Image: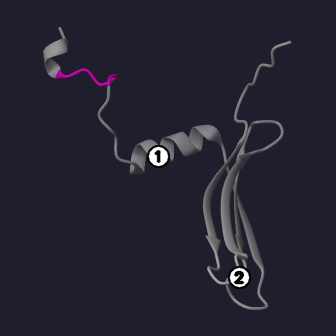
Amino acid sequence: MTSSHNGAHGTVHLLTDSDALTACVRRTVRLEATPDGKSLLLNDVDSRKPGIHREVRYEITPAELSAAIRAHGAELPGENHPDAADRD
């Protein structure tokens, strides 16, 4: 049986900050799809300050994230970027 996905799925761990002496995780940032695939959640869990545990969640749609990356990211050259000599 094959599964089909509509929308976002999966999790990406973007940042993990560990204390070198204790090997305890002090901060994690991950991007994960909601169960329905309609949104992405950016989860930022911060325990770097003693006695303070902060967890912040942000929600964005896959289309909004793609638009933000296109607007603010650097486009990389690649095979899908024909140069002017290839155009008619």
Query: Where is the N terminus found, in terms of image quarters?
Result: top right
Kindly identify the residue that appears in the image at 65 percent across and 74 percent down. 18
Percent x, y for residue 8? 70, 35
**Residue 85 belongs to the span the image colors magenta:** no
Q: Quadrant of residue 64?
A: top right
* Residue lying furthest top: 88
Percent x, y for residue 85? 13, 16
Kindly identify the residue that appears in the image at 72 percent across and 43 percent down. 39
**Residue type, mark 2 in image:** Thr
Which secondary structure is most common in the magenta stretch?
A: loop
For marks 2 and 1 on the same chain, the one whose residue lies earlier in the sequence: 2
Mark 1: few/some/many CA within 10 Å (<14, 14-19, 20+): few
Q: Could you say whether the residue bearing mark 1 is in a helix, strand or loop?
A: helix
Q: Is residue 66 left or right of residue 36?
A: left
Which residue is nearer to you in this view: 86 or 25? 25
Answer above or below: position of 33 versus 85.
below
**Residue 80 belongs to the span the image colors magenta:** yes
Find the distance from the CA under tag 2 to the CA under tag 1: 36 Å
Kindly identify the residue that appears in the image at 73 percent across and 25 percent down. 6
Kindly identify the residue that appears in the image at 62 percent across and 71 percent down. 17
Q: Is residue 31 left or right of residue 79?
A: right
Residue that numbered label 2 is attached to: 22
Q: Could you say whether the residue bearing mark 2 is in a helix, strand or loop?
A: loop
The residues colored magenta run 79-83
Residue that numbered label 1 is attached to: 69
**Residue type, mark 1 in image:** Ile
Answer above or below: position of 26 versus 84.
below
